[in-house]
Amino acid sequence: MSDTITQQPPKHARRVKAEKPASLWSDAWYDLRRNKVFLIGSVLALILILMAAFPSIFSHINAYDPATCDLKTARRGITGEHWFGTDNLGCDTYSRVIYGARVSILVGIITTVITTVVGGGMGLVAGFFGRWSDVLLSRVAEIFFAIPPILGALLILSVIGRDNAGIGTVVMALGVLYWPLLLRIMRAAVISAKNQDFVVAARALGASSGRIMIRHILPNAVAPVIVTATLNLGAFIAAEAGLSFLGVGVQSPTISWGLMISDARPWFLAQPEPLLFPALFLSITVLAFVMLGDAVRDALDPKLR
Amino acid sequence: MTNPSVDTHLLPADRSAEPLLAVDNLHVEFKTRQGLVRAVNGVSYSLSAGETLAVLGESGSGKSVTAQAIMGILDMPPARIPKGEVRFHGTDMLRLSEEARTQIRGQRIAMIFQDALSALNPVFTVGWQIAEMFRVHKGMSKKQGYAKAVELMERVRIPAAKQRVHDYPHQFSGGMRQRIMIAMSIALDPEVLIADEPTTALDVTVQAQIMELLAELQRESNMGLILITHDLGVVADVADKIAVMYGGRIVEHALVHDVYASPAHPYSKGLLESIPRVDLKGQDLYAIKGLPPNLLDMPTGCAFHPRCPYRRDNCVTDVPPLYEISGTRSSACHYFREVLDGTSG
């Protein structure tokens, strides 16, 4: 029986499509490339990231230039010149929506990176070393975990961010509240990887603690963290818009979809475009990252296969 | 002991009288919620270069725990070593620092495990994992490491090693995986190899191949081999000495042919009689009555007494010492003479 398996042509097995691909990662990548949800999500995400990095590609009007706002053309509907209409101050809604992507994407990505590195790192330490480091880190995480996120962010921003509200303070508030989630996930994954035989075997063959942690445990524990991080990205973007809408997030003249929605609210019935378009882009952005997260989760979780 | 903290070089010349590896009166206990589990109670054995010691016993007899204590891979806590020494070239390894032990592990004493699939890291290719041994311990480059990996895979007779070096563990069959594990363990030419049930997860023909491979590698490099198993059939051809363990103690220690010819402990006798034999086909297979002892609640006196056909009153009260029968042979049974006679007569 075992011989038949041995005899299988091993040459370039990973490149032959009909055969079972190797390793978790190439397996996942194989799945992802064939997943429509992933493809749509990643195309949308790429467009949005491009929009955030180079808004001038998409709009010839620099929305940060106050001279482009013309009160004479305020509150116009959709026209050939102003595709999404103009807002209360006569600024072009289309270019503002395009330029607003930057804040959302930046907050989403930076917060995700920070929470993943900080929470994941602490989770790795807590799970790997256990004992007092685990007790200490887990208890601290639980304290932060107990704070309701929106309330906590409101509190942090209204205290610290009163004078210098901006991307930095929003990132900090969200980071402070969300790192414990990543700690928990990483810790659990590390503990389950730590007790596997190959970790004992690596030790028996002379691997040092650091090497075991980085080479043997981390690659086997990182999958759930990546999934959570991707799903979180969408949640952070939505949270930024929410906080900006409430007036404690980024402030004018920074352009943010949350701020635009907030600004357009009083005139919504008379002229809905300045509210609807940023809301639509916000929804698409969150959707794109949730789709990515879902696809990555499906690809990395062998049990769902 | 001479200053063990600095003695990491372990020069063999200093202590020519010492065997390569000696386990002396080793005790291991585990703290559990149910109480203290004494998994190993005063085990002693020794191993010389080129020698094969088979440690035999059923699950829970302490054979694997002893090996893990030698390797220093027990999780402490819950494990604890209250007494005993593990001397490698005369130096008690239990007193060495963790760094010094990491230096010994893999390079001078290596270990292979029962289930090679779970003992290999699933996210790296086998070549990467074998090459890692050379990169970490010998400072070789990636390319040199891979070349060495192919060389080793050929040495453990993996067909088409050059192509397979980039495959992942799950793409190999059970026997091939165990060969990979063996390749990793012998990568740095260790002086002692501990094989913890290396063939248990494999089918019979592959078992024989793996044992043959181990014996061959041992002959080539003159390393000492500790073979932990519960399969007497595996032992006969390759082992020089046998240590039979029961309830965390060695109950019989002898040269392998002596045990097969006439066991000196009722437990070893029971094990031998429970091997299926062609000439007794159709008859009921002999089984040792009763169950292995509960380590939380060990029987008084001789741990084997509840299952022993030779039991007398004093077996229930007196713990039998390891009686020396001859220079190479000892048995922890008050009535070893009767046991010996029973088989021969």
Image: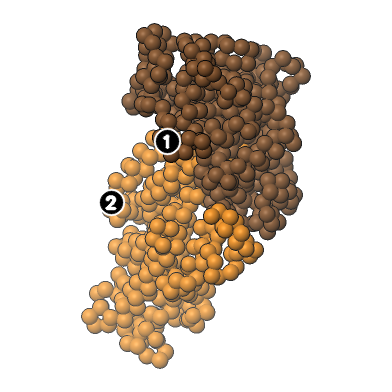
Chain colours: A orange, B brown
Under mark 2, the amino acid is Pro
- The answer for which chain carries disc 1 is B
The residue sitting at 50% across, 82% down in the picture is A60
Residue bearing the label numbered 2: A148
Within 10 Å of disc 1 (Cα), the crowding (few <14, some 14-19, many 20+) is few
The residue sitting at 61% across, 24% down in the picture is B257
**Residue B241 x/y as whole percent:** 62, 24
Q: Is residue B215 left or right of residue B343?
A: right
How far apart are labels 1 and 2 at the CA level? 71 Å
Residue B288, quarter of the rendered image = top left
- The answer for which chain carries disc 2 is A
Within 10 Å of disc 2 (Cα), the crowding (few <14, some 14-19, many 20+) is few
Above or below, comparing residue A192 to residue A78 in the picture: above
Q: Quadrant of the C terminus of chain A?
A: bottom left
**Residue A214 x/y as whole percent:** 56, 45
Mark 1 and mark 2 in contact? Answer it, CB < 8 Å.
no
Nearest the eye: B185 or A56: B185
Residue A209 seen in this snapshot: no
Q: Which mark is residue B283?
A: 1
The residue sitting at 29% across, 46% down in the picture is A146
The residue sitting at 38% across, 80% down in the picture is A93
Above or below, comparing residue A134 to residue B39 in the picture: below
Q: Which mark is residue A230?
A: none
Residue B307 seen in this snapshot: yes
Q: Secondary structure at mark 1?
A: loop
Q: How many numbered callouts?
A: 2
**Residue B202 x/y as whole percent:** 53, 45
Residue A41, quarter of the rendered image = bottom left
Q: Secondary structure at mark 2?
A: loop
Under mark 1, the amino acid is Gln
**Residue B123 x/y as whole percent:** 55, 53
Q: Nearer the viewer, mark 1 or mark 2?
A: 1
